[in-house]
Amino acid sequence: MATPQRERGETGDKLVAHTKDGQVFKGFSRDFHPGRESFHLVLRKGELASSQEIRVDELKALFHVKTLGRKDRHRGRVPFFPADDVNRPPEGTYVKTVLEFYDGEKILGYTSDYDPGRTGFYLIPADPEDNNEKIYVLSSALVNIQLLRE
């Protein structure tokens, strides 16, 4: 019996790129890596495909999503950490984290690799109902970060 794997897009991970200037790009990518200067998002519509180059330093955050095109049901909800930390990853040392971006958006989650000297880090959303599997956050897009050590 095959082990279930997370769904991937036709050409890679399903991503939603939010730039610092407010633009949003959705698609699939095989070449995103935090250490690269840029990557490509590919959007397929039927037989047609288009590619958009995204510069990593222009990102606010890169959302690795479960489903492309899903409307954000969480807009307007007060962010919270579930009482049982149900979405906290089991492996590694993860810290509860509260992020505030320059545009006022706040995201709560868990991180294990935040380093103020690095360009960015990954965050696992606190809300298990969230459409995001993980988020690559650019430190330069933040106005505040709180690491809530227990």
Image (spheres, rainbow, N blue to C red):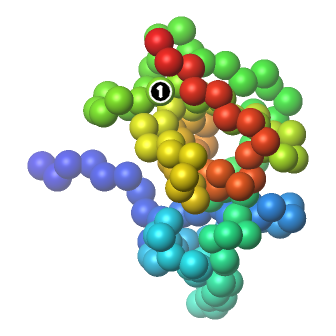
Q: Residue at x 27, y 48 (%)?
A: 4
| Quadrant position of residue 75 | top right
Reply above or below: 78 against 42. Answer: above
Tell me the kind of residue under disc 1: Val
* Figure check: 24 above or below 139: below
| Disc 1: CA contacts within 10 A as few (<14), some (14-19) or many (>=20) | some
Query: As drawn, is 142 to the left or to the right of 150?
Result: right
Provide the residue designation for mark 1: 95
Tag count? 1
- Locate residue 55, reporting x and y percent: 66, 77
* Left or right of residue 124: residue 7: left
The residue sitting at the front extreme is: 117
Considering only vertical position in the picture, is 31 above or below 99? below
In the rendered image, residue 24, in percent from the top left (x then y), is placed at 78, 64
Of residues 139 and 130, the one nearer the viewer is 139
- Residue 82 vs residue 67, the one in the foreground: 82
Q: Which residue in the rendered view is the most extreme toward the left? A: 1
